Amino acid sequence: AEMAPETTLKTGSQKGASEISDACKPLKKRSRASTDVEMASSQYRDTSDSDSRGLNDPQGLFGKSLDSPAAADADASDTQSVDSGLSRQDSGTGQRDTVCQICEVYGEGLVLCEGDCNRQFHLECLGLSSPPEGRFTCNECRNGNHPCFGCKSADPEVTRCSMPGCGCFYHDDCVRKLPGTTSGSGGGFCCPQHSCSTCCLERDVQRASKGRLIRCIRCPLAYHPSDSCLAAGSVILTHHIMICSNHGSTKKNGLLSSPVNVGWCFLCARATKKNVGKGGKLLCCDSCPASFHPECLEMEMPEGSWSCSDCRAGKKPHYKQIVWVKLGNYRWWPAEICNPRLVPSNIQSLRHDIGDFPVFFFGSHDYYWINQGRVFPYVENGKNFVTGQININKTFKKALEEAARRFQELKAQRESREALEQERNSCKPPPYKIIKSNKPVGNVQMHVADLSEIPRCNCKPTDEHPCSLDSQCLNRMLQYECHPQVCPAGDRCENQCFSKRLYAETEVIKTEGRGWGLKTNQALRKGDFVTEYVGEVIDSEECQQRIKRAHENHVTNFYMLTLTKDRVIDAGPKGNSSRFMNHSCSPNCETQKWTVNGDVRIGLFALCDIEAGTELTFNYNLHCVGNRRKSCHCGSDNCSGFLGVQPTSTRVVMEKEERSKNAKLKPKKRKLRPEGKHTHEYFCFHCGEGGELVMCDRKDCPKAYHLLCLNLTKPPYGRWECPWHDCSICGASASSLCDFCPRSFCRDHEAGALTASSLDDRLCCSNHNPLSPLGSVSTQPRLFDRSPVRVKEESEAGRPAKE
């Protein structure tokens, strides 16, 4: 069965191959090498929330009864709230849906288990005729033997998700492998059913846990209900429960279902000239039409089943996405995936299974139910896909034109929607909880001194401004805040800025190229107290956990300041306006540690006279915990280019002072000490450009690289050595190095690999011209581009933190 043509509306089942529209009839001499098109191997996901093609179809719309929760949910599926206040709301106990966990059918009057699982059941499914008296618990809760929601095996060694109201249990090893798992605040974990799987794959971590989520009743998957996130083919049961597309039947018409794989390599056929990908041994994905040459993937032909990287990651087709569709023996045809509620009612009544979704064929304007195994994404300029085919009829040409127009239309809508969302987000800073004083987390202790322990200053109560900035207050000089019951001036004391929160009038502003910032609305004198740096006070262990968690979720903004040797202030989740102050190599403020009522607190003070309307900045003195260097964008004349690196003028002054100090020493007492600091180059050794670099940890190796040049998406943990020290051919320890690129060779492969160049006889590889090694590089591909990155595991974290 293939397709129901648009001219026939009364059919109740899909027609046979002999009754398909003429637009999809096969070509007698179709070329198998019709793949001269540049297509990306990753799937295209459209984020447009515009109406589907089926909405304007004159045949009518498919509708559901408004009494069904799924129908009400469908009316709101095109919109998605990103309000942070709703991010966790749907996970509470007040949002339970009345779906039986046994028969998976919506109903009223279900029996709620009052144990740990929080599941609901029909009385008939439990074998009961009347509601049980008293507190009801299911067999699993009574026995304490819950199955793992990931692997489905029953085991007492399972742990419940820490999210309130979630009754899912997992093995620790199972849940840590699932994408979307996050660490809970109390040391547990938050399972993937509380973050959108699509947003996690797109690395949109901030959006993944916001808004309403719809969760699969059978597996740990959840999506936002919008067409851009929800996997096509999922069956909606209620507002918050679905059966995702992964649970389709394994049989179609009594036969095992399998994908229709393409006859060309998705990599080389899309990037080279015609017929390059034709023939040869292809490695076919078992879940989608993708095929690859094993040599293109740099792997051997595996035994048994195999899935491509997109399918292993969990990428799915989405509604309002343009795809190529394969029906029977007919050509690949461009179509658009439609939301089932927007297709004609007679199409909706055709037989289909979980995981099937309707597609609208361009050119012929037919509909058909299809699954993931017969579609792959359409890309821009996709009409080159049919270059070289013969006898292409008018309908197919029309389909290519309509698909190209629709693709551009959806692309424009997506870009417009993203621009509006970005503009909306740029109108206010990211959400955080405002607090007035430091809040301890976990076992962190806040010290409170006895009145007898607080020092007493020598100021007099008759002074005009006792304990002020211009006074000789001993406590102020030692950075102690006076206590009103101890200071002789009492309430007239002007050294109580922390306790009384005498902050300067400031305002959060949007800066150019540096995100959000903080400016002063009043003039400040040198030494004036600006504000206190307030946040959560955490210990070193919790600090490392938060840095690791941020590293896993691709979070790059940190708000941590070292308070004492074992305590850190983190103003990320909670804090005040001081968290918005940016770094500058030439700052107008500085941090000072003051003792207030026996405990240490951090204040920000003016370094110079500051006019009203000026942005407030301070030097982060960033301490890099790993091997990643953060670029500085302060724009100062003495900018060092990177956070944590001393400004230019500071280094010059220190060098002059060091030379002057050494000149006064007698030669016999002068001690030569080796340079202790490991310096690195400021430009990528691969492409020669600056920016955010990963530095080699090998001793005396100054090389640094872009993550993209290393084929990495995130910086490596712990100690890392660059590929320059490994043979570019076999990966063994290198003995000969090219001085102009990261290529190197071991003793077995160094013969004839390097040549002395005209530049001081420095060695160069075959990628360079010995007469001009710094000139243009030859077009021969570098083996470095595909060499694996060797990482030595250590306990170091790979993220920066402020100090």
Image (cartoon, rainbow, N blue to C red):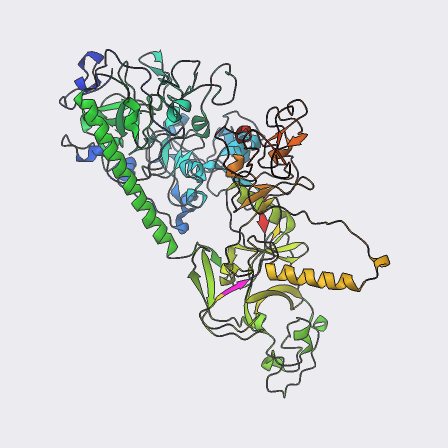
Report the span colored magenta.
Answer: 616-622
- In the rendered view of the protein, which quadrant contains the C terminus? bottom right
Depth check: 126 or 757 in front?
Answer: 757
Q: Is residue 645 visible?
A: yes
Looking at the image, residue 92 sits to the left or right of residue 646; the answer is left
In this view, 708 is above or below 17: below
Query: Which residue is at a point 56% across and 72% down the rendered structure image?
Result: 608
Q: Is residue 309 magenta?
A: no
Question: How far across and how far down the image is residue 51, in percent?
Answer: 23, 38
How many numbered discs, if any? 0
Looking at the image, residue 430 sits to the left or right of residue 236; the answer is right
Looking at the image, residue 396 sits to the left or right of residue 772; the answer is left
Residue 90, by quadrant, is top left
Depth check: 702 or 553 in front?
Answer: 702
Residue 533, by quadrant, is bottom right
Depth check: 657 or 372 in front?
Answer: 657
Question: How far across and how far down the image is residue 278, in percent?
Answer: 38, 16
Q: Is residue 357 visible?
A: no
Looking at the image, residue 236 sits to the left or right of residue 206; the answer is left
Q: Is residue 618 magenta?
A: yes
Question: How far across and how far down the image is residue 218, in percent?
Answer: 42, 29
Question: How far across and how far down the image is residue 491, in percent?
Answer: 59, 80
Residue with the most extreme bottom position: 462
In this view, 293 is above or below 191: above
Depth check: 394 or 535 in front?
Answer: 394
Residue 362, by quadrant, is top left
- In the rendered view of the protein, which quadrant contains the N terminus? top left
